[in-house]
Image (cartoon, helix red, strand yellow):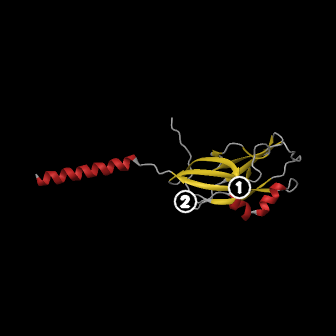
Amino acid sequence: ILSLSVVACFRDGDFIQAARKAQFHEQRTQWHDLLGHHCPRFGRDRLVAIPLPKPILPLQLLDEYKLQLSFDGDRQLTPWLTIMGKGAPSVPVVEVVLRSSGSELLGVTASVATAPVAYQHKHMQLVQEFRNASHWPKHLLVRYHFETHNEVDLNRGLAVLFIAGLFSFLILAVTA
């Protein structure tokens, strides 16, 4: 049995396909693709403001608004992140860490944190949107950060050691 794994290869700066799904009033929306300027770019850290759709029914004080993100054609998913409601920061920022090796995307982790004061001063309009319960769509700050993990190529390492050993053996044989 032959199994093939499909892996997308990216170059530095390529857009990584991304989508979002929302949950409010215990109902989930369908996946919605993000526009290019909201997507991460391979190997580049960036900060974007993603629009959040307005719930069909108004959110009450105790209601939660959750978000899930998908990357690389649904190969990498984040857990459900509470953006508004109980336990959520008043001005959230989603920290997304994308792990890569070479030209491959290995994994994604995400968490919600309170937006740093510098972000809040720079993006005052977004802060006001979150504080105004009737203003929709709200824009959520998402910070993409890349971590690169380089794996050692065992075959190349063994080839270099073999050639170095052979070269050393030849030098010893000639000088002896």
Foreground pick, 43 / 97? 97
In the rendered image, residue 112, in percent from the top left (x then y), is placed at 69, 48
Q: Quick one: SS at disc 2?
A: loop
Residue at the spot x=64%, y=60% of the render?
46
* Residue occupying the far left of the picture: 176
Foreground pick, 141 / 171? 141
Q: Quick one: SS at disc 1?
A: loop
Foreground pick, 57 / 166? 57
In the rendered image, residue 41, in percent from the top left (x then y), is placed at 61, 59
Separation of residues labelled 2 and 1 (CA atoms): 30 Å
Foreground pick, 61 / 53? 61
Amino acid type, label 1 = Ala
Residue at the spot x=60%, y=59% of the render?
45
- For disc 1, the neighbor class at 10 Å (few under 14, some 14 to 19, many from 20) is many
Residue at the spot x=71%, y=55% of the render?
115
- Can the viewer see residue 35? no
The residue that label 1 is drawn on is: 115
Residue at the spot x=76%, y=54% of the render?
91
In the rendered image, which quarter is residue 42 located in?
A: bottom right
Q: Earlier in the sequence, mark 2 or mark 1?
A: 2
The residue that label 2 is drawn on is: 11
- Disc 2 vs disc 1: Cβ atoms closer than 8 Å? no
In the rendered image, which quarter is residue 27 located in?
A: top right
| Residue 144 vertical position relative to residue 67 in the rendered view, above or below | below
In the rendered image, residue 50, in percent from the top left (x then y), is placed at 74, 56
* Residue occupying the far bottom of the picture: 122
- For disc 2, the neighbor class at 10 Å (few under 14, some 14 to 19, many from 20) is few
Q: Relative to 98, is 27 on the left or the right?
A: right
